[in-house]
Image: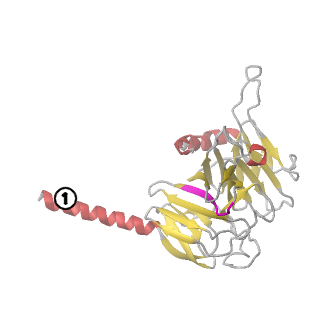
């Protein structure tokens, strides 16, 4: 009898494992692209394009809002030499420069699924000699996604660059960035934080909230100008709040390395259409066939948080602390 029960239990567990694997990876049509891949654990879902990209075009709760921006007039398009934003999450290489940075990702990408991780590989960029790869691993039990970004140098010479992960968020929300902890004078005499402004940054713009503990940037569809900011973010997190849902990123900082844009590993850009939550890896001098990697961890939670710093302390900060182990 014991042997029969054990065999039955193994059979049930095998069925559950198979069902989970099938649920985790599925080919779907989305936004006019017929060959997208859907990853889901039954709670959250990601949709990844393979007709263009590599791009994660959707991230949200199953049946819920897409936290990522979709440019409706560009959905489903392929081919051509024009760079298109498309929306969603993408990989670039920094520092930004035109036309180098704006190589179009309008052709199909290779994708491979090993039962746990989806790997996307873009053909070599003909103008830069760089290959972009993104690896996506969705936790089967938690609202947690690990995203590995990789740049590979296929030139015959060294190239200096930094991986740059840009998540284009849907309109109407606000980004939250932590400030370094307060330290009193004269106990601490040296600077503890750097903040970088672009030529078009207006600190009086009402979309900014300059707080004691946090800097917040609101996306406003009625705005007519663009804003951007960068940070040396040693605390390793940034968030975006939209309609009762919080998208949280964890990422690393290496004090021994040099980062682009006057030392930024975290940046944000907004215009009337969207807001970007961006992270950057350190600059690397890649030899031929050398690569650089940058890791992000994503989390999605349903919460109610106002713009007050006390609300962020009470609602957002506990989620940050819960994910401390995922800070690369």
Q: Pick whichever, 133 or 115, lies toward us.
A: 133
The secondary structure that most of the magenta stretch takes on is strand
Colouring rule applied to residues = secondary structure
Residue drawn 44% across the image and 55% down it: 141
Residue 138 highlighted magenta (yes or no):
no
Residue underneath mark 1 = 6
User: Where does residue 113 sit, x and y in percent of width and height?
Assistant: 47, 67
User: Where does residue 226 sit, x and y in percent of width and height?
Assistant: 84, 57
Please provide the residue range marked out in magenta: 146-156
Q: Pick whichever, 209 or 22, lies toward us.
A: 22
SS at circle 1 = helix
Q: Pick whichever, 179 or 286, lies toward us.
A: 286
Residue drawn 58% across the image and 61% down it: 134
Residue reaching furthest to the front: 156
Where the N terminus falls, by quadrant? Answer: bottom left
Can I make out residue 208 in this image? yes
User: Where does residue 164 sit, x and y in percent of width and height?
Assistant: 68, 55
Question: Which quadrant holds residue 185?
Answer: top right
Can I make out residue 173 in this image? no
């Amino acid at each position: 009898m014991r042997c029969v029960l054990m065999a039955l239990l193994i059979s049930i567990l095998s069925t559950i494992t198979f069902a989970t694997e099938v649920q985790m990876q599925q080919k779907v049509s989305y936004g006019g692209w017929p060959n997208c891949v859907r990853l889901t654990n039954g709670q959250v879902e990601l949709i990844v394009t393979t007709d263009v990209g590599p791009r994660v075009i959707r991230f949200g709760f199953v049946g819920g809002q897409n936290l990522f921006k979709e440019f409706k007039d560009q959905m489903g398009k392929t081919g051509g030499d024009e760079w298109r934003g498309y929306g969603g999450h993408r990989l670039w290489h920094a520092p930004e420069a035109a036309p180098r940075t704006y190589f179009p990702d309008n052709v199909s990408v290779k994708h491979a699924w090993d039962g746990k991780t989806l790997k996307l590989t873009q053909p070599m960029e003909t103008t830069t000699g760089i290959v972009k790869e993104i690896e996506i691993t969705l936790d089967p039990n938690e609202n947690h996604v690990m995203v590995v970004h990789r740049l590979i140098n296929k030139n015959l010479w060294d190239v200096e660059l930094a991986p740059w992960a840009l998540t284009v968020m849907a309109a109407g929300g606000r980004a939250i960035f932590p400030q370094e902890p307060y330290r009193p004078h004269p106990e601490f005499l040296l600077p503890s934080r750097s903040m970088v402004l672009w030529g078009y940054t207006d600190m009086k713009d009402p979309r900014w909230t300059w707080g004691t503990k946090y800097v917040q940037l609101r996306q406003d569809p009625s705005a007519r100008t663009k804003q951007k900011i960068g940070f040396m973010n040693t605390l390793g997190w940034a968030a975006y709040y939209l309609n009762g849902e919080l998208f949280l990123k964890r990422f690393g900082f290496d004090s021994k390395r040099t980062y682009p844009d006057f030392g930024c590993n975290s940046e944000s850009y907004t215009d009337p259409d969207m807001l970007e939550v961006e992270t950057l890896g350190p600059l690397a001098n890649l030899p031929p066939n050398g690569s650089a990697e940058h890791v992000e961890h994503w989390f999605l939670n349903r919460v109610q948080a106002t713009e007050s710093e006390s609300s962020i302390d009470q609602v957002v900060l506990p989620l940050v602390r819960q994910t401390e182990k995922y800070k690369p």
